[in-house]
Image (cartoon, grey):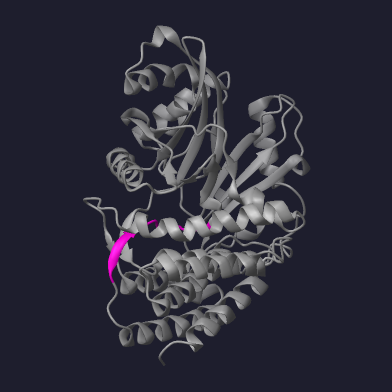
Amino acid sequence: MSAAVYSVPADPALPELQELFPVSGAPGFVARMVQEVTGSPVTQETAELCHVRYRPTRNCVVLWSFSNPSGVPFLVSGLSGDGTGGTARASFQRSAEMVRAALGGKCPYQYVPERRLLLQVFPLDTRLPGLALAASETRIREPFCRSLGLDCEHVRITDLVPVNYKPWRRCVLRYGVEIRGRPVQYFGKVFRDDRGEPMAARLRAVRDQLLASGSSWDLAAPASYVPEARMLVLEGVEHSEELSAFLRQAVYDPQARETLEDEIARIAEGLRAFQSIAVEGLPCVGPQDVLSDHEAELDGLRHVAPALAESMRVRLRTLEATASRLPAEEMVLGHGAFRYNQFLRSGEKLIILDLDALRLAGAGADAGEFLAYLDLAALRGSRLRPILPTCEEVFLSHLSERGRADPRWVAWYRAAAHVKWAQRTFFSLRPEWPDLTRGLLQAADQMLGGLPA
């Protein structure tokens, strides 16, 4: 993998950025650190770049995964541009000692001053002080059991795997647990702060009201909160399938296509019951808040990709003017990241995932987000492209029958989400970001073209 492939911009505030994207794998100095820690021969070609979060003129977060003879990937994250990243904090040093012990006394982090780069071995993370505890089978067992009201004597953690890690932001861990010999699965979501604590009560309120309404939707039951790890614990969902898998199968399998159409219809129909749920203490996110969030992302972008930043600014101004001409919309419960890959199919139920960003939002917000993500999937040139128009058609037809959203606001939020995904695509430095951002902004123009000028 090369810097040219990753289309890394020249950033005057981050001259070291190019070094993070070598011809293949990880930079040599990262591979050498891994070799020092593991004591095993490691080459940079054995690494895979898993995650990038670039903030122009500010910093860049990168995650590499190195293959390991044990079969468990060895994860190393890097933070470029933010100095030592808080390594002097007492919470960081406590976490570092935990990870150091697990590594046989080897130091789990390294600051490279000439590159202004902090390297950390998973599960060490300066912004997730609870992760080292949450990812330790021995140390998390007692607080985990206590939070669930279980007797540790009868509980054994049999498996602990990170399933979704975004350095400096959050991590999802899968726990295989035996309780009196009975296997049970839990998922732990580790956050930077205590936002997970009130989430448990909110998710219970959502689930109770969904069940009472007779909706086909459900969600993973919140089990507990572990304050020492800043971790929300959710019960695993048995016998479930990702809806994304049906999309892939539906391209060539008529039976899977029929199932997919039924599930997309249930997503649209279930949105009304979801939007009718009352939850206390949620932030209210209206159209102007959406635009302000997107506008804030342009500050650094202007210095590294001025033409792209200007084209986004133009679309945001058009969105602002258009919103002022639309009638006021109803504010309802919003998911905040509503798309097809946030659903599992479990028997007669659809399990909705990732409810971290619950909010009060416009009635058209989630529907617009859902459709914009279909547009993004099509632009990525994936094998899903033949089935996506059917998904859109089914979703819109059932939304109009059961939904409460004004189609004009749905189109507005769809266009706003196009701009959001254009920004995120650039910040991920995906190899195809130039074409993707161009296509997304053109899609926004198409949506806005059908709205009041």
Q: What residue appears at the point 27 percent right and 41 percent down from the top-left corner? A: 198
Q: What residue appears at the point 60 percent right and 39 percent down from the top-left corner? A: 76
> Main structural element of the magenta stretch: helix, strand or loop?
loop
Image position of 367 with respect to 139: above or below:
below
Image position of 84 with respect to 60: above or below:
above
The spot of residue 255 in percent (x, y) is: 71, 52
- In the image, 329 versus 322, the foreground residue is 329
Decide whether residue 285 is among the magenta residues.
no
Residue 56 visible? The answer is no
Residue 315 appears left or right of 386: left
Most extreme residue toward the top is: 153
Q: Which residues are magenta?
A: 330-339
Decide whether residue 333 is among the magenta residues.
yes
Q: What residue appears at the point 66 percent right and 26 percent down from the top-left corner? A: 38
Most extreme residue toward the left is: 280
The spot of residue 154 in percent (x, y) is: 43, 8
For the C terminus, the quadrant is bottom left
Most extreme residue toward the bottom is: 453
The spot of residue 192 in percent (x, y) is: 38, 43
Q: Quadrant of residue 127?
A: top left
How many circles with numbers are drawn on the protein?
0
Q: What residue appears at the point 64 percent right and 44 percent down from the top-left corner? A: 64
Residue 252 visible? The answer is yes
Q: Quadrant of residue 9?
A: bottom right
The spot of residue 117 in percent (x, y) is: 55, 48
Image position of 48 with respect to 33: above or below:
below
